[in-house]
Amino acid sequence: MHEILRATAAVFCSFFAMIALNIVLSFSKADEFIPNSVLFVYFFCAAFMISGYRILVKMLYNADTAETETVPVIIYGAGKKGSLLQKTIGKISDTPYKVVAFIEDDETLVGKTVNNVRIYSYRQLGMLLKPLRIKVLFFSSSDTDVFIKNDIVDKCLLHHVKVMSVPSLDGWMQNHLRSNILKEVKIEELLGRPAIRLYNPAVVSFLCNKRILITGAAGSIGSELARQIAEMNPATLILCDQTETGLHDLEYELQKKNNLSEQLKFYLGDVKDFQAMENMFQLFRPEVVFHAAAYKHVPIMEKHPSEAVRNNVLGTKVLADLSKKYFVDRFLFISTDKAINPTNIMGASKRIAEMYCHTMQENGQIVEDDPVVYRLSSAEPKTKFITTRFGNVLASNGSVIPRFREQIENGGPVTVTHPDIIRYFMTIQEACSLVLEAVTMGKGGEVLLFDMGEPVRILDLARKMIMLAGYEPGKDIAITFAGLRPGEKLYEELLNKEEEVMQTHHKKILIAKTPHGNTKQVAVDIIKLIQLANECRDEEVVKQMKLMLPEYISNNSVYELFDSSYNDVDDSSVAQM
């Protein structure tokens, strides 16, 4: 109809011009330019012939295209985005896609048609894939409910149908849809819960025009925090890390995306180095500190207990002490679910760091009088010390998903430690958004937990990643089991049995009421632990950690032998104290 209307309109313009000319000539007593009867015949004949010619060309083109093998596809979403996608998808020259059906979760649309293509319920998908010989399914929108998305993806993978996603409408309408911007659905999009989306004006208001320090800024969490905070117009954003290349790459990225030449400050330094950190505090005087620097790899820390304590405990102590000394408003410590009932060195070190932050909130900074005796300052703590805990972060440095992806690209096998191992997951963007929310709501002394949804079975994760890549698990790509690594456990927890949970104004953030015992004794024990770590006395370090954390029971580790004897060590240590 569009082609017919365009052709008819063009012919009518010339017809109308000549009719008008004839009328003018008739008023001037002149002969007609062309008889009106001829003009009417011309109008109808020309409109029919031009329209018919254009329609014929299109029919011949479509017939020629139909002779080539087309790719039958189905689109999820029959709204505006789905309709535009249908009109555009067939014009991608290198892939002759043909939309044969729509599916929808809106039952009011089921049974109707869009451009002569029928709309079905997404629940009927399993019955459509084989009869319609579907090769590809497109999600026309990125905000599909995660449970529906998982259901659709599972059915598609079962029938070896490729699942693709389309960028946001603004991302391709201006530049036209091209095959290279169509992306396969990634495992990160298939979390077992709805994605957490946050934009709290109170967070932006709180961080705007403040001097903000991020340690571990070159890491996964630190760099994403930097990206999000850079958009909130901080007065100064200080990014600290001991990794030179990582800092350089982050500087290039942020300078390219944000006009923050004056606000961005990069500081190369180790959080264990008190002098370097104090120099940084003197230079920049941060008002808010996000402490993300940590050693996190469980098997490596199991072999290096002293380094785990020096970086995770001493590093936290250095930053916390300086935050108190330089009147930082808020200090947020990023912990982990591995700190709960720890079975490894890394988790235990993070739990002790949590305890130190609580001690700082309760009593203030530890002050050394001599090499043996320590006391706590009695000054009222101005700094609010806040702790956050969350589980594994999808696609972070060294996490399981990049490793699985690399193994699949190399043809396998995909290595899973244990068939029953499960983990909590969230995206980097979600984790950092919740961290920013937590630093705003924290009053000091809390341990804030994030709702991680249901845990994910790692074996299921591996299988789905293999299928998303177009392979069959166990046939094209093998899955092998390597056994639990030193210090690793089958499942993680966000609370221990002694902790209670309270709600906050945000349904995704909870407060854990954590018993910390005698804070003065905790302070003394931490000083002793750091001394042992500085002397690299690994076994004594582990024994001291077990004394401080009765719930720390080693798993699949050489340090399991201390679990049966640490009570005796505890008695002797207490007698010496």
Image (tube, rainbow, N blue to C red):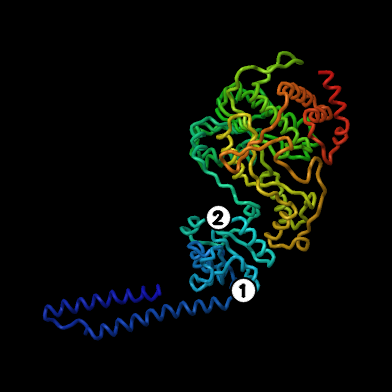
Helix, strand or loop at mark 1: loop
- Please tell me in which quadrant of the rendered image residue 165 appears: bottom right
Helix, strand or loop at mark 2: loop
Mark 2–mark 1 Cα distance, whole angstroms, equals 26 Å
Vertical relation: 402 (above or below) 100: above
Q: Which residue is mark 2?
A: 143
Image quarter (top left, top right, bottom left or bottom right) of the C terminus: top right
Query: Residue at the location (55% across, 68% down)?
Result: 102
Residue 245 in sight here: no
- Tell me the amino acid under the disc marked 2: Asp
The label on residue 476 is none
Q: Which residue is mark 1?
A: 132
Q: For the view shown, which residue lies furthest in the left direction?
A: 29
- Please tell me in which quadrant of the rendered image residue 363 appears: top right
Residue 291 in sight here: yes
Label 2 crowding class (10 Å Cα cut-off): few <14, some 14-19, many 20+? Answer: few
